[in-house]
Amino acid sequence: MTDIIRITTTYLVEVSDADLKNIKKYSLDNFLLNDLRSKRKLIVAGKSSMRKSSGAVWRAEEKKQDKEFHNGR
């Protein structure tokens, strides 16, 4: 596995009525992760970070998300 970098950021998203419908239909996470917005994201200055992570941490996160997905949260 190559190097793993974890990026955490905070940003503001201007949403339209169509965006709100997509959020209700697909969830906020999917709206953000799949870039369903109609307007640009505004990054909040000074709130982003980047750090190295290990393969073990990555695999543990994947396992946790997979379990949540299959258990229907």
Image (cartoon, rainbow, N blue to C red):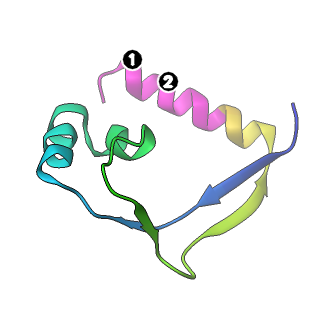
User: Residue at horizontal 28%, vertical 45%?
Assistant: 28
Q: Is 69 or 21 nearer to us in this picture?
A: 21
Q: Secondary structure at mark 2?
A: helix
Q: Secondary structure at mark 1?
A: helix
Question: Residue 21 occupies which quadrant of the picture?
Answer: top left
Q: Which mark is residue 70?
A: 1
What residue sits right under mark 2 in the picture? Answer: 66
The quadrant of the image that shows the C terminus is top left
Could you tell me how far apart the alpha carbons at marks 2 and 1 are, in whole angstroms? 6 Å
Residue 64 within the magenta-colored segment of the rendering: yes
User: Residue at horizontal 41%, vertical 62%?
Assistant: 41
Kindly identify the amino acid type of the residue bearing the numbered disc 2: Asp
Q: Is 22 or 64 nearer to us in this picture?
A: 22
Q: Is 30 or 73 nearer to us in this picture?
A: 30
Q: Is the residue under label 1 in contact with that under label 2 (CB below 8 Å)?
A: yes
The quadrant of the image that shows the N terminus is top right
Q: Which residues are magenta?
A: 60-73
Tell me if 11 is positioned left or right of 27 in this view: right
Residue 12 within the magenta-colored segment of the rendering: no
Locate residue 9, reporting x and y percent. Answer: 53, 64
Instruction: Categorize mark 2 by other alpha carbons within 10 Å: few (<14), some (14-19), many (20+).
Output: few
Q: How many marks?
A: 2
Question: Residue 60 occupies which quadrant of the picture?
Answer: top right
Q: Residue lying farthest front?
A: 39
Locate residue 37, reporting x and y percent. Answer: 32, 48
Kindly identify the amino acid type of the residue bearing the numbered disc 1: His
